[in-house]
């Protein structure tokens, strides 16, 4: 685990910065090799957000006002108590809960059934959830059209027939990225990405203009311009599993907008989970999805996903900045990643 320590006014940390960039380089060369299986890490590190007047004698090209990494003390891990334990970066002081939405959160108020309940009454996350849920039908319709191919017009009688192909999956979970491990998942898990490793994907924009527009309207909160930002249609096919693991950082919150949920998730004698045949566990809490009702979670807690039914489960997944990370802090974190990429420590 890497720890992120916010310090925007302290000066004279040139040696710490040199050491921290050395650590950053070491982890960016193989950024996902650690912590994906059961969250096992060799030791935590601190990332510090440097001020513009900090010493920087070791490398004149490194950016000022950028995050750096400093080795920190060991923490308790692998205990029965579930706590956020990201595999790479950790920023102390952020509010943390496995889920930021209660079960069936849209049904909590009979007087106002559309009222959204978000942990701490957090206004920015509430705004994002309201925006996604109000556009649920439009997003689902576009998924059915762009990914499933429903409603596409073809004219095979033309001299040069043109067939509009559905959008193809764009992420190989077996080869690269945050979820790269043949031991992390089993079955079939398809991605159709709008944001992939922090970068917007033109093919998605072209195939899904309405969903693109809906997501862009939340741009200040989107987890962009860093290798750990994602937004994609996540299709978990029948008899598929994503095994317990920790996300790479606690700087983001992850939102699931369920588009298609299996019709019968009641456990039977063959179910591995007693609560539901299709669900997600974050920490010690288990939830099922309900179409059109967003789930907000902190994936720096250990989590797993399963679909033991014979139907697909489809969500729009969206990463947003943790609301406790200030704008200035976000800028310095992004600057750190830009520098790492410039130095060749990170690959696209």
Image (cartoon, rainbow, N blue to C red):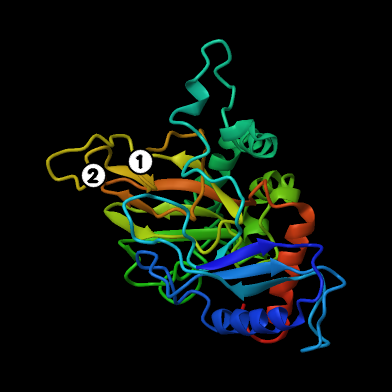
Above or below — where is 298 with respect to 274?
below
Marks 2 and 1 close (CB-CB < 8 Å)? yes
Above or below — where is 322 with respect to 21?
above
User: Visible in this render: residue 319?
Assistant: yes
Q: Which residue is mark 2?
A: 273
Q: Position of residue 11 (x, y in %)?
A: 82, 71
Locate the C terminus by quadrant: bottom right
Left or right of 186, for residue 86 = right
Q: Position of residue 3 (x, y in %)?
A: 58, 65
> Real-space Cα distance between discs 2 and 1?
10 Å
Left or right of 264, for residue 329 = right
Left or right of 321, for residue 293 = left
Q: Which residue is mark 1?
A: 286
Residue pictured at 51% horizontal, 35% vertical: 101
Q: Secondary structure at mark 1?
A: strand
Q: Position of residue 114 (x, y in %)?
A: 58, 22
Report how many numbered discs are placed on residues in the image: 2
Report the front residue among 191 and 298: 298
Q: Residues within 10 Å of mark 2 (few under 14, many from 20)?
A: some
Q: Position of residue 153 (x, y in %)?
A: 56, 50
Q: Residues within 10 Å of mark 1 (few under 14, many from 20)?
A: some
Q: Residue furthest left?
A: 269
């Amino acid at each position: 685990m890497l720890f992120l320590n916010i310090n925007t006014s302290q000066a004279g940390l040139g040696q710490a910065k040199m050491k921290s960039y050395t650590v950053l380089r070491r982890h960016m060369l193989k950024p996902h090799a650690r912590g994906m299986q059961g969250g096992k890490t060799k030791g935590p590190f601190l990332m510090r957000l440097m001020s513009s007047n900090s010493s920087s004698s070791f490398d004149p090209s490194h950016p000022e006002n950028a995050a750096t990494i400093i080795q920190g003390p060991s923490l308790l891990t692998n205990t029965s108590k579930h706590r956020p334990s990201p595999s790479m970066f950790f920023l102390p002081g952020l509010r943390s809960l496995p889920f930021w939405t209660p079960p069936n959160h849209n049904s909590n108020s009979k007087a106002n059934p559309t009222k959204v309940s978000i942990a701490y009454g957090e206004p920015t996350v509430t705004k994002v959830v309201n925006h996604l849920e109000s556009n649920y039908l439009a997003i689902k319709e576009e998924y059915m059209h762009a990914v499933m191919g429903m409603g596409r017009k073809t004219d095979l009688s033309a001299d040069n027939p043109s067939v509009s192909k559905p959008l193809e999956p764009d992420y190989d979970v077996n080869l690269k990225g945050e979820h790269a491990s043949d031991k992390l998942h089993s079955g079939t898990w398809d991605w159709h990405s709008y944001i992939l490793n922090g970068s917007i994907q033109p093919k998605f924009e072209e195939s899904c203009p309405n969903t693109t527009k809906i997501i862009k309207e939340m741009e200040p909160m989107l987890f962009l311009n860093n290798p750990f930002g994602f937004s994609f249609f996540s299709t978990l096919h029948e008899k598929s599993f994503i095994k317990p693991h920790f996300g790479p950082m606690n700087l983001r919150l992850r939102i699931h907008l369920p588009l298609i949920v299996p019709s019968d998730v009641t456990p039977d004698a063959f179910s591995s989970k007693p609560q539901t045949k299709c669900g997600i566990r974050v920490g010690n809490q288990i939830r099922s999805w309900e179409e059109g009702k967003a789930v907000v979670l902190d994936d720096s807690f250990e989590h797993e996903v399963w679909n033991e039914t014979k139907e697909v489960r489809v969500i729009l997944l969206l990463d947003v900045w943790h609301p406790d990370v200030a704008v200035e802090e976000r800028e310095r974190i992004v600057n750190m990643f830009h520098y790492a990429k410039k130095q060749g420590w990170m690959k696209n």
